[in-house]
Image (tube, rainbow, N blue to C red):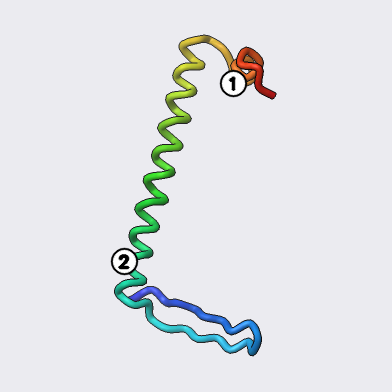
Amino acid sequence: MKPQIKIVDVTTGEEIIRDATDAEIAQMELDAAEAAARKAEAESKAAQRQALLNRLGITEEEARILLGGN
């Protein structure tokens, strides 16, 4: 079953629901892959930051104070 696309004309309230085209499906898959890559990168950076804090034996708030952050 193909994903559905819903188009709403806000001036008339008319709604159109149709199957996504192959190009739209490909874009959805690309968008999902890019979002997954961004999430994985953010999780990796967070893990690296936490590992560094653990090695230093300080909290994130203490690191902010040391670095002059708010």
Q: Give the SS element for disc 2.
A: helix
Residue 22 image position (x, y, % from top left): 30, 74
Amino acid type, callout 1: Glu
Near-viewer residue (53 or 21):
21
Residue identified by numbered label 1: 60
Amino acid type, callout 2: Ala
Q: For residue 21, which quarter of the picture?
A: bottom left
> How far, Cα to Cα, is label 1 from label 2?
40 Å
Picture residue at 50% right of the left edge, 86% below the top: 16
Q: Give the SS element for disc 1.
A: helix
Q: Is residue 43 above or below residue 65?
A: below
Q: For residue 58, which quarter of the picture?
A: top right
Residue 32 image position (x, y, % from top left): 38, 56
Q: Is residue 42 above or below residue 33?
A: above
Residue identified by numbered label 2: 26
Q: Are marks 1 and 2 in contact (CB under 8 Å)?
A: no
On screen, residue 40 versus residue 65, left or right, reads left
Residue 47 image position (x, y, % from top left): 44, 27
Near-viewer residue (12 or 3):
12
Picture residue at 42% right of the left edge, 44% below the top: 38
Camera-side mark, 1 or 2: 2
